[in-house]
Image (cartoon, coloured by chain):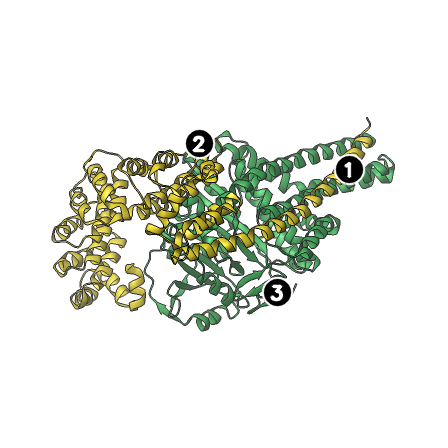
Amino acid sequence: MNHFIHGFDAAVVVYFVLLNSFYALLLILALPEIWEQSLLAEDEDLVRLQEVGAPPPISILVPAYNESATIKASVTAILTLDYRHYEVIVVNDGSSDDTMGRLEDAFDLYEIPRTYPETLSTSPIRALYRSRTRPRLLVIDKENGGKADSLNAAINASRWPLVIAVDADTLIEPDAMLRLTRPFSLGLRIAAVGGTVRVANGSVIKDGRVVEPRVAPRFLPGIQVVEYLRSFLYGRLGWNRLGGNMIISGAFGLFRKDYLLEIGGYRTDSVVEDFDVVVRLHRYLLDRRLPYSITFVPDPVAWTEVPETLAVLGRQRERWHRGLILTMWKYRHMMLRPRYKRIGLLGFPFFTFGEMLAPLVEVLGYLVTALGLWWGFIDVPFALLFLLVALGYGMILSIWGILLEEVGFRRYRRASDLVRLLWYAALENFGYRQCTVWFRLKAFWSAIRARKTWGRMTRTGFAAAGTRIPS
Amino acid sequence: MTAETLLFFVAVLQGGSIVVLIAVLLANRWLRRRRRDRVAPRRMVLDEAIKGWALGDVGPELVVRGLEALPRSDAVEALLAWSVRLTGERWRALADALERRPWTTRLRKAVRSRTWWRRLEAARFLSVAGTAADAGDIERLLKDPHPAVRITIAVALERFATPRLVNIVLDRLPDMVGPVQAHYAAVLRGQNAVTVPLLTERLGLVYDLGLPRIVEFSGRLGDARLREPITALATHRDAEVRVQVARALGDYPHARTVTVLQTLCTDPAWEVRALAVRSLGRIGDAATLADLRSRLADAEWWVRLRAALALTRLGAAGRDALLKAETGAQPDARYVSRLILGLSPQALSEFAA
């Protein structure tokens, strides 16, 4: 038993060292990337591009299910973006609340006939509406079929060659689209681009815009601010350098429509349709040896409301992890296949062993260490020291995320926000991290049972004018 | 060294790293604030100087002095910001005044830098303050390996374009994606005297693989002198060339254009037919009514839709044709006519855009 416990502990240490070395590599790679991106993100260049009308026309797809609390503010914000050529397609996915009624009242809708072929099959469309006050807006009212089904319906109706999927509870910054299309304006062979998603809880919102970003004072959303910064600002930037991102956030991602149509649109049987669609895009483009890149640009920003209670957070994280497990399993044939280049040789192993199996390894590590301590096989000071190093490393990565934010973007101007960020970076490893491990662990059970439910997300709704989202 | 000692050493190292990171965070805030406090008043002085100079109250020397008081990157940023608002002779006078200052000489030298961000800064400066003497540097930057440098320097072509510089752009056309092409077309639109003869020459190279992009680019410029060479390509064997011809001719309302588009309405490739029908709608010649009506029964959905939309732009005659088709024998024509007749004027104008 002694040998087993020491052997297992050694394996956990090796796993820990390998995984954290990879995170360190991502961080090192993110540094030149953020430097390059911040140099390219000069405002004056964007103004000039906009003036000559070079940015390509875009269709913004907004699936909405029971979003009556936020739909008016978020659609209004989307309709007043600082971008010349775009249309907005809102899909009411058979909401059981008053989402459709709110849209009708807010935008003075009138019914129109359908004038496009159904390229991707979807749930039946009830009616299509245009707005008397907002010519850019098209509203599709359809039977409930899920988010992926709504996105497919919106893709069918879209007119332009680029489409952006945006969550209805997301607030896009006015210049975000202009920034998101920068890789296209540079002439790069782009298949998809992702922008940064930030936490809106606690910020000052006016007319559907975040006018003063703040770090939420409450523990749970506050910690998620740090988590999002870390994930977006060095995780995805690092992956840019490693040969392409495997995640483009469903809340804010731009895709080439022709490629989406080629791969059959979004899959309605996936619980993480954004992850699934990016993996399929990689597979499709690598199978055909087409030159492409799927990249992340940090300066376009969309703000989203994150869970404020453990129950809602648990459902969200369980679904994300279940989706990860099912997607990794579904496309397992791409793992370690040279044909799929860095996606198969780096992305898949990392997401499988570093992300998918991480909660299992962590919990087993806790259990075996506890047993070792109980039976006296493991030294108490050694175990505590190891725990300290593990937690310290997590804290360092979080502080690096904050530093990248401070050097690159500096959205949180108040000193109190910086103090809060550092405080949450320290607290994240005590309790919050263990909770998320538990939520992700539960995902294995539901993945085995192949549950396809999303779980309910309770929204507070964006405040109408000059107030803060309660957090 | 035991594992425990190693872990202890790592923990101490981590603690030190955390302290250093927090110190860097605080120092970054302090330095930024200090820089802002130093630069902001100077920027205000410069803005006032430029306003006075634009009104003719002060000479360009005051503006140059204001620019020199700023850090180099801020000076370039200020120039870019003002270049959007000020153009013409006054701006040229400022560019001349900036030609032999020490800081602009350093910027010009950066054209040959090995680091792309230095070349980008030089391109930003030369795009608004370059003079005829900088043609060599601009040529070099137009061929730069970094796409951001090429896109940025292209703006310099707005003010002076030589055949040599324009040819560099035209050589790259086959590899350009839509937004980049639109950018170059926008900056060259004011330089048609140089661009059109070069494009006409290239439109005559019928076996050039890059011909579709050349036609597309010519269409974006919309110069009347390009109508004839574009029309001559209507029978080209490559369908992609014919697609671009059909698209471009919509901007040239002319009897010869209409005849060519009528022929393209029966092209074997449906993409050509759809764009020819769309262009006929944009021209709005009543003589094409029969052609458009016949396309209501086209085998391809998009051609039928475009034909019905084009008919709505022919006034009462077009509407009558749609009403007839709505109750006619051909089921496809019946469906598409009913669909278009059901659209509001606003929806119609959006579709026709």
Q: Amino acid at mark 2?
A: Arg
Looking at the picture, how far across and down is residue B278, in whole percent?
23, 55
Residue A216 as seen in the image, left or right of residue B156? right
Q: Which residue is mark 2?
A: B112
Few, some or many residues within 10 Å of mark 2 (<14, 14–19, 20+)? some
A282 is higher (above) or lower (below) than A142: above
* Residue drawn where x is 74% and y is 40% of the image: A390
Whether tag 2 and tag 1 are in contact, CB under 8 A, the answer is no
- Does residue A29 lie above or below A420 as drawn? above
Residue, disc 1: B11
Q: Residues within 10 Å of mark 3 (few under 14, many from 20)?
A: some
* Residue that label 3 marks: A469
Chain A drawing hue: green
> Closest to the observer: B112 or B209?
B112
Instruction: Answer above or below: position of A129 versus A290.
Output: below
Q: Secondary structure at mark 3?
A: loop
